[in-house]
Amino acid sequence: MSATTTADDARIPLRGHLRHTGALVRRNLLWIKQDPESMFDALLMPVVFTLLFVYVFGGSIGQALGGGQDGYVQYVIPGMIAMMSMTLSQGVGTGFSQDFNSGVMDRFRSLPIGRGSVLFAKIGVELVRMLFATTVLMVVAVLVGFEIHHWAGLFAAVGLSAVFASSIMWVFLTLGVVLKNAQSVQAMGFLVLFPLQFGSSIFAPTNSMPGWLQAFTDYNPLSTLADAARGLMLGGPVAHDLWVTLAWSVGITALAAPYAIHKFRTKS
Amino acid sequence: MTVRGLVKHYGETKALDGVDLDVAEGTVMGVLGPNGAGKTTLVRILSTLLAPTSGHATVAGYDVVRRPRQLRRVIGLTGQYASVDEKLPGWENLYMIGRLLDLPRKEARRRADELLERFSLTDAAKRPASTYSGGMRRRLDLAASMIGRPEVLFLDEPTTGLDPRTRNEVWDEVTRMVGEGVTVLLTTQYMEEAERLASELTVVDRGKVIATGGIEQLKAKVGGRTLRVRPADPGQLRPLAAALDGLGVTGLATTTVDTEGGAVLVPVLSDEQLTAVVGAVTARGITLNALTTELPSLDEVFLSLTGHRAGVPEDAPSAGTRDDREEVAV
């Protein structure tokens, strides 16, 4: 072995990584315990958005779709699951940015732990928040008349959203490391979020949109995620949307994760 | 700890401009310098948080650039920045760090209890760190850096912003830690702190080491002394001061009157000046009950080494304590 390869001879075993990530997950969960208000967004967002879209826009969009408001509920709820994955992912970036400004990050970076542990823990806790929000969403959905046809399909849709969310979280983590403060992370996050969310099939079918926009929405991962969720929960073709969503998830993770970890270690 | 030619550039700014440093095992090295001298940059490089632009540094036998992981196992860091998680209770902070240092659950629990006890934080164990007072926070910081029983401890301005009483508490703790054989690198802009805690001193200014050595040695290098002249009759203080002020003897500072201590302080640079002071007192027929020489304060040391005052903020404690006086037979 050459000198350069032995430089890293203090390799951390997998169990070590799990231990570190576990300790950091505990930390982030304790935050929620200390400050339950931090869960308000995860609690209120699904409620507010469901009520807004079903009762404010639901009637007219539903009419156009041919199923009325009840038909729109079936259409929009799987879309909401997709939306939640994106909107809540954003919180991971702002939280991370706050960590950096609080000084605790330097403590972590001076400890003999893997580069990724701190970030994996953030993602883990954010996924817990997302599952909580999705549960709230499904309760509200049933209350406004959503019918769950396939439980397995529902779980599959939530799982796919979680996969996509963890990939997009790497992007927000990168923003959290690179940008100076939580406000800019949030502002930047919205810039990414808005076009992706509304230029998608989450809230309305894309076939009435102009051609140039359709070209965008067809490959927007939030469209394919929403359509895949719809297929899984309501029945219908799934394969194409599923693969495109997974391809996006893998692609985004492959690019953003190493970059975020690198930036995390070298940030001064 | 060995540092050779350490350089760190931020664009055009040279935060460190070729720093050499040697710290013997089990000693306390004070790094003294004003704000912006490069102290924090130095600590961040030595604790693996920052990569140097060039140069080498070895801490506890590990190269900081090539063996960061091994090094992180044997160092503790406490400073203005590397702190604790404010939202977590004190105990949870220590337990978390124990787990991150690979202590088994039971051991991490025991260590957290033990250190809270030792730093008198047991009563506050369950409260979030954000509710702690400044002194409690600093003690928790110190406890956090002690969890892994480090061989080398970095204290980056450990008492900046603390009130005098709390500062003394922190100093006592640091002194105890040193008694256990830890090697400490302490940065400070307080002369008093360096004198109290460090055995060796490195003075840095604008990214460069401008002096290094034992504290007494550095003072001797500057060469100045201060004479403390105390008249037997306190009523003679003013006349004595007037007489000595008119003498034209000037060391590193001007002649001052210490009303509380009932003495006149005269800085002198040479034995001749000292003798002139004694001569002036005798000529005026003033009876003295004490005449002592004191080594110059670190403030004066800094001034004479750099030609400018150390960047001590206004709320900083006053210049060095004067407890290394030698009685001169009168």
Image (spheres, coloured by chain):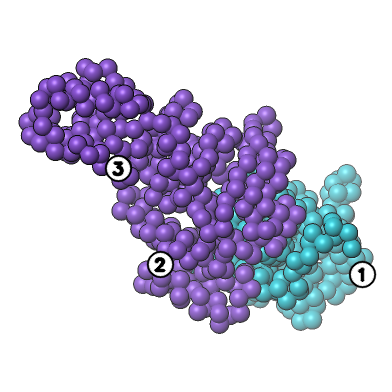
Residue lying farthest to the right in this orientation:
A240
Instruction: Residue A43 in the image: state x and y as whole percent.
Output: 58, 67
Which residue is label 1 attached to? A239
Letter of the chain shown cyan in the rendering: A
Q: Are marks 2 and 1 in contact (CB under 8 Å)?
A: no
Tag nearer the camera, 2 or 1: 2
Crowding near pointer 3: few (<14 within 10 Å), some, many (20+)?
Answer: some
Q: Earlier in the sequence, mark 2 or mark 3?
A: 2
Inspect the image, locate mark 2, and give the three-letter code of the amino acid beneath it. Phe
Which residue is label 2 attached to? B119
Q: Colour of chain B?
A: purple
Instruction: Residue B160 in the image: state x and y as whole percent.
Output: 42, 47
Inspect the image, locate mark 1, and give the three-letter code of the amino acid beneath it. Ala
Chain under callout 1: A
Q: Which mark is residue B325?
A: 3
Q: CA distance from mark 2 to mark 3?
A: 33 Å
